[in-house]
């Protein structure tokens, strides 16, 4: 797994025997995290170190492991993560889907806001797990910090960097974590948003510099992202209301299929500039802003400073009212 570029690389493929058993033998020079998948569906992460002999047994409701304590930590973490997801996020996902089917815009906006609250609670509880001494001292913790961290985890990630630079100073996982912490600080509240240029649907270059002088929402989305599309009516309404008062939107798609991207823009009624490298999460702009999940957004002031993140629905509207009035 490459957490930094999201371009994971398939290293080996095997066919199970009649009993469902399989075996991989992979040459390793340093600890790395792999995903074992069945039919391209992720099944389990393993943290393999040179010389490890890791045994896994897949049962209906659990995965048993031996031979790698770090792999067991990953399995335990993922089990906990799913429980925390069900505790905070499942309800908002399900309710948002029902709201979308109803077509009630107020209801949709309400559940979008509730989803953001639940998402922060979800990440906060995951961070509590990571802080446990046994986990934070394991390279397994990189899996959390590269995928599910929040802006409130900077101190925790700094602590991990100090641990890993001492225990695993020359490993790829440590290098990726250090890079992640550096880029996360680069897009912290109060920082000047990193500049970028990208292409719109017609292939014309769009430069973030041209948005100086306006309050600008950089909105990362994709045609296949349900929560992103649920937010579309709100964005269309707010853009129409505030565009003449100094508000603009620059949407950055992580789509890979151009036709699906263009059809979604047309169907959802986006009339502002929309750009994409059409390279998924590996696109240069997504990487620059360390976007590993969507929806994801950054609100900039007129000087290009990041003043808020991931505001949706009524929360975004309230912020725009605060900045520009009704």
Image (cartoon, rainbow, N blue to C red):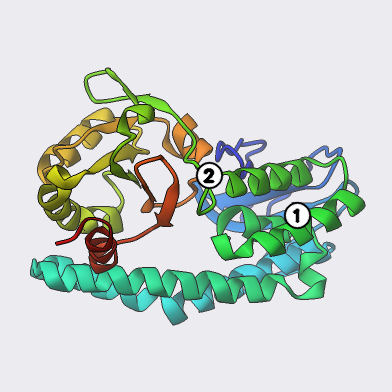
Q: Is residue 277 left or right of residue 38?
A: left
Task: Kindly identify which residue carries mark 2.
Answer: 290
Q: Is residue 87 left or right of residue 23?
A: left
Location of residue 276 in the rendering, given as x and y in whole percent from the top left corner: 34, 31
Q: Is residue 125 left or right of residue 254?
A: right
Is the residue 140 above or below the residue 210 in the image?
below
- Few, some or many C-alpha atoms within 10 Å of disc 1 (few <14, some 14-19, many ≥20)? many
Location of residue 34 in the rendering, given as x and y in whole percent from the top left corner: 68, 48
Compare residues 284 and 244 and report the one nearer the observer: 244
Closer to the chain start, of discs 2 and 1, is 1
SS type, badge 2:
loop
- Residue at 37% x, 25% y: name it: 198
Q: In which quarter of the image is residue 152?
A: bottom right
Q: State the quadrant of the C terminus.
A: bottom left
- Residue at 23% x, 36% y: name it: 260
Q: How far apart are marks 2 and 1 (CA)?
A: 23 Å
Task: Kindly identify which residue carries mark 1.
Answer: 47
Location of residue 127 in the rendering, given as x and y in whole percent from the top left corner: 63, 71
Compare residues 292 and 76 and report the one nearer the observer: 292
- Residue at 38% x, 75% y: name it: 90
SS type, badge 1:
strand
Is the residue 22 above or below the residue 275 in the image?
below
Q: Quadrant of residue 257?
A: top left
Q: State the quadrant of the N terminus.
A: top right
Compare residues 165 and 83 and report the one nearer the observer: 165
Q: How many marks?
A: 2
- Few, some or many C-alpha atoms within 10 Å of disc 2 (few <14, some 14-19, many ≥20)? many
Q: Can residue 122 be seen in this view?
A: yes
Is the residue 37 above or below the residue 151 in the image?
above
- Residue at 22% x, 62% y: name it: 321
Q: Can residue 59 be seen in this view?
A: no
Location of residue 28 in the rendering, given as x and y in whole percent from the top left corner: 83, 39
């Amino acid at each position: 797994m490459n957490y930094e570029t999201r371009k994971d690389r398939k290293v080996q493929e095997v066919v199970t025997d009649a009993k469902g058993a399989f075996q991989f033998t992979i040459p390793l020079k340093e600890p790395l995290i792999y995903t074992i998948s069945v039919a391209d569906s992720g099944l389990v992460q393993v943290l393999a170190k040179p010389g490890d002999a890791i045994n896994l047994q897949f049962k209906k409701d659990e995965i048993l492991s031996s031979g790698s304590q770090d792999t067991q930590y990953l399995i335990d973490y993922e089990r906990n993560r799913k429980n925390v997801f069900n505790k905070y996020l499942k309800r908002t996902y399900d309710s948002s889907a029902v709201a979308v089917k109803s077509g009630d815009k107020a209801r949709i906006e309400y559940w979008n806001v509730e989803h953001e609250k639940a998402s922060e609670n979800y990440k906060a509880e995951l961070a509590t797990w990571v802080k446990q001494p046994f986990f934070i001292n394991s390279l397994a913790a990189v899996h959390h910090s590269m995928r599910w961290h929040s802006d409130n985890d900077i101190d925790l990630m700094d602590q991990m960097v100090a641990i890993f630079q001492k225990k695993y100073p020359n490993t790829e996982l440590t290098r990726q974590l250090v890079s992640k912490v550096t880029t996360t600080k680069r897009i912290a509240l109060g920082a000047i948003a990193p500049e970028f240029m990208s292409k719109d649907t017609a292939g014309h270059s769009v430069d973030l510099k041209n948005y100086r002088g306006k309050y600008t929402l950089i909105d990362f989305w994709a045609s296949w992202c349900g929560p992103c599309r649920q937010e579309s009516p709100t964005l269309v309404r707010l853009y129409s209301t505030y565009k003449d008062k100094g508000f603009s939107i620059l949407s950055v798609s992580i789509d890979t299929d151009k036709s699906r991207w263009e059809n979604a823009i047309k169907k959802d009624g986006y009339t502002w500039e929309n750009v994409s490298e059409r390279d998924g999460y590996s696109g240069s702009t997504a990487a620059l802003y360390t976007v590993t999940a969507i929806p994801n957004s950054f609100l900039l002031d007129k000087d290009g400073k990041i003043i808020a993140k991931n505001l949706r629905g009524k929360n975004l509207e309230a912020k725009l009212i605060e900045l520009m009035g009704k």
